[in-house]
């Protein structure tokens, strides 16, 4: 009696049942080894043919460019297809036409992107899209947090509502719990007082508590909680982040404050986008590698090609097919809105599993051996993708690209980290004589007073780490212009750090 006359409801039901049964019954290890026996060329070609045949918008996109889908037979053919962008595809066609068969009703949820690069975008998805993303969460909960044997409270600290992060995370954590893991999910969202309440009232009933959220907000939760007398260490805190590149100094700081002993197994970051959910995730292996490289900037520059340290994750090529074009990432994948060669404007690159281990071996480091004392859970031969973030989040100063990540390290040094929230605004300005200077407005932590000694100490620390980490800065910028001009602002300053607004670390003049 729940069937529609045209049978659409039947189709949704069958798809949902089949996908959910496969997710529940397929062991994690089996799923993460699929790529070893899968022809990625065949699966990518099959995705293209399915989208070209069934998605009205993509049919029109190809027709407008006089591309015959039958001519795409090899991976080389596939890589000649024009890139999709928000401008030439997503904003040019209706939401319904972007879905399979032009039927938006065949999806069951719509989310909204953050709008950090412009006008917010709507994204339709179905449970099948979420289930493949749930595997990324299962990887973290099983391989890193050992949640198959530990009663776990998952506290979703992303904003709830139409924005993609909170609801997506909640759904995926519930799917993992339904697979038999002793995981219970609670959703205070980004309400700090509610987070404190659920942790203090529920935390003792579990063997560990996982906080999932945006990195600066999680740090704010931890710091404010400490000021409220919360003893984080009693709850065996684990941390899941998404949405921002952070340094290993920052990871060490937050894990130390919650009493976590092993950052490789007590934390994990997701590389996600509203466009397609989670594309990859940190593993104990990738974190171990990144922490090794963080202390060796010259080696990191040799591997990644830049002086800043990117987010480094592993991904499943059966779920997401990545390419690199002109130093930026392109991916293809099944979603409520299927995407073929979608350009997400993130600068980064790809490294195969074997290439990564060979590079590290030549440098005298074996990350697998380094993790052996913990059982090396989750060491799968999945490829790596590294992500610097959007290229337009830099500022140019005397021809040197200055990255927020470089400044962040200077704020995360002992003593200084106690004074600041970690937020800042980086910009290049001119004085009365039109001489350019590097301006950094830094947000003070609640209750911390502003004085000249603090300002000078912060400027000196940022300067030292810019010189250490950014070779362009050290070589391009004249010595007399290298010291940044730091301004200290109170918490929630309405001009630079308005409360409730997604923070931007750079400003362009």
Image (tube, grey):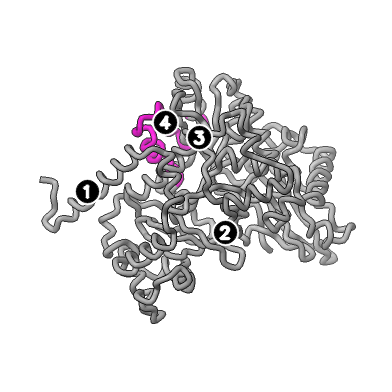
- CA–CA distance in space, label 2 to label 3: 27 Å
Q: Give the mark nearest the N terminus, 2 or 1.
A: 1
Question: Marks 4 and 2, how far apart in space?
Answer: 32 Å
Label 4 vs label 3, nearer the camera: 3
Residue 398, compared with residue 3, is above or below; it is below
The residue to which callout 4 is attached is: 186
Q: Which residue is mark 2?
A: 346
Identify the residue under disc 1. 14
Helix, strand or loop under label 1: helix
485 w.r.t. 150: above or below: below
Q: CA distance from mark 3 to mark 1?
A: 31 Å
Residue 127 placement, left or right of 489:
left
Mark 2 against mark 1, which lies toward the viewer?
A: 1
Which residues are the magenta region?
165-194
Q: Residue furthest right?
A: 480
Of the image marks 2 and 3, the number of the one nearer the N terminus: 3
Observer able to see residue 490? no
């Amino acid at each position: 009696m729940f069937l529609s006359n045209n049978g659409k409801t039947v189709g949704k039901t069958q798809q949902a049942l089949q996908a959910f049964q496969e997710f529940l019954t397929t062991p994690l290890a089996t799923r993460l080894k699929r790529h070893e026996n899968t022809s990625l060329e065949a699966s990518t070609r099959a995705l293209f043919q399915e989208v070209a045949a069934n998605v009205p918008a993509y049919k029109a996109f190809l027709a407008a460019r006089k591309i015959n889908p039958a001519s795409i037979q090899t991976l080389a053919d596939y890589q000649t297809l024009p890139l999709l962008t928000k401008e030439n595809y997503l904003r040019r066609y209706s939401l319904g036409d972007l879905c399979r068969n032009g039927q938006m009703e065949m999806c069951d949820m719509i989310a909204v992107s953050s709008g950090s690069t412009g006008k917010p975008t709507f994204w339709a998805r179905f449970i099948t899209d979420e289930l493949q993303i749930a595997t990324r969460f299962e990887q973290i909960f099983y391989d890193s947090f050992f949640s198959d044997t530990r009663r776990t409270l998952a506290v979703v600290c992303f904003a709830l509502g139409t924005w993609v992060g909170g609801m997506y995370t909640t759904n995926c954590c519930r799917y993992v719990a339904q697979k038999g893991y002793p995981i219970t999910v609670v959703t205070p969202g980004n309400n700090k007082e509610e987070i404190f309440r659920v942790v203090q009232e529920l935390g003792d009933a579990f063997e560990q508590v996982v906080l999932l959220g945006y990195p600066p907000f999680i740090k704010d939760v931890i710091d404010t909680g400490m000021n409220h007398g919360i003893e984080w260490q009693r709850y065996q805190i684990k941390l899941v982040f998404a949405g921002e590149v952070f340094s290993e100094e920052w990871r060490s700081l937050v894990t130390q404050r919650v009493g976590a002993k092993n950052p490789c197994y007590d934390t994990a970051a997701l590389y996600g986008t509203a466009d397609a959910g989670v594309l990859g995730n940190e593993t104990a292996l990738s974190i171990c590698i990144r922490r090794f490289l963080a202390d060796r900037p010259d080696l990191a520059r040799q591997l990644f090609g830049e002086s800043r340290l990117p987010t480094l994750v592993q991904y499943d090529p059966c779920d997401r097919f990545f390419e690199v074009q002109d130093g930026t990432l392109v991916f293809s994948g099944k979603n409520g809105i299927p995407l073929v060669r979608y350009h997400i404007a993130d600068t980064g690159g790809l490294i195969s599993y074997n290439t990564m281990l060979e590079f590290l071996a030549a440098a005298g480091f074996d990350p697998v051996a380094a993790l052996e004392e913990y059982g090396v859970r989750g060491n799968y031969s999945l490829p790596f993708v590294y992500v610097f973030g959007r290229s337009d989040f830099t500022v140019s100063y005397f021809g040197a690209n200055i990255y927020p990540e470089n400044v962040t390290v200077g704020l995360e040094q002992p003593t200084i980290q106690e004074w600041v929230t970690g937020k800042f605004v980086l910009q290049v300005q001119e004085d009365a004589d039109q001489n350019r200077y590097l301006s950094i407005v830094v947000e003070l932590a609640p209750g911390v007073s502003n004085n000249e000694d603090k300002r000078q100490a912060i400027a000196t620390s940022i300067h030292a780490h810019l010189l250490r980490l950014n070779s362009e800065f050290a070589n391009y910028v004249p010595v007399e212009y290298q010291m940044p001009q730091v301004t200290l602002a109170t918490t929630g300053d309405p001009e630079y750090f308005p409360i409730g607004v997604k923070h931007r670390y750079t400003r362009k003049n």
